[in-house]
Amino acid sequence: MKNQLLEVFNVCSAFLPRQVTLDFVSFDSEWFRLIHGVTTREEEEKIEKKKYPLHGMIDISEKDGITKRIFQDTEDIRDIPEDEKKDYATLIRCGICMEETIQRLQDDFIKANVLFGQDMWVSLNDEMLNGWKRIREQGLVDEFDIPILPQNNEEFEKFIRLLESDRIEK
């Protein structure tokens, strides 16, 4: 599949913006949830609350904001008259882990570019992603990239040693 994408990219490169790159992130959202036994309900009730503890705590009434339709699919742009594009918004989403967040941001920024004629791109920083994977492997965050906070002084000291050793290994 990677070779096929590279070939399509090469054939189409003259028509693509120069900022478009091919970043290969080995991740499948459905398989990840299946392997870790994550249901939609569990994701909303447990993981989202742990990962984003302030989510939903801000009360915004309709009078405080603007209601927009969500632009879901780039193909829909053909059906939206120019003067109605201002009535749409692009939802920028994070994922269940770093890899899914990268994929979602790439998709969502493309939607924003199509809808608003912007030039925003998400590029993969291999060094940062590999550093994050090392932090995950060392047990500083779990498989959902939720920090595993030290429960006592001994764990805290181990936590600090792991952070320092990762900084040196780079």
Image: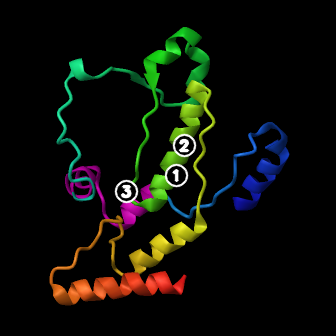
The main secondary structure of the magenta stretch is helix
Say which residue label 2 marks: 107
Q: Is residue 24 visible?
A: yes
Does 134 sit above or below residue 16?
below
Q: Which amino acid type is marked by label 3?
A: Ile
User: Marks 2 and 1, Cα distance to the nearest angstrom?
Assistant: 6 Å
Which structural element holds mark 3? loop
Say which residue label 1 marks: 103
Q: Which amino acid type is marked by label 1?
A: Gln
Which structural element holds mark 1? helix
For marks 1 and 3, the one nearer the N-term is: 3
Does 111 sit above or below residue 116?
below
| Residue 32, image x, y percentages | 42, 62
Frontmost residue, 61 versus 36: 61
Magenta region: 29-49
Q: Residue at x 33, y 77 (%)?
A: 140
For marks 3 and 2, the one nearer the N-term is: 3
Which structural element holds mark 2? helix
Q: For this view, does 52 lie left or right of residue 122?
A: left
Contact (CB < 8 A) between labels 2 and 1?
yes
| Residue 19, image x, y percentages | 70, 46
User: Marks 3 and 2, Cα distance to the nearest angstrom?
Assistant: 15 Å
Q: Is residue 47 magenta?
A: yes
Say which residue label 3 marks: 96
Q: Which circle marks residue 131 in the picture?
A: none
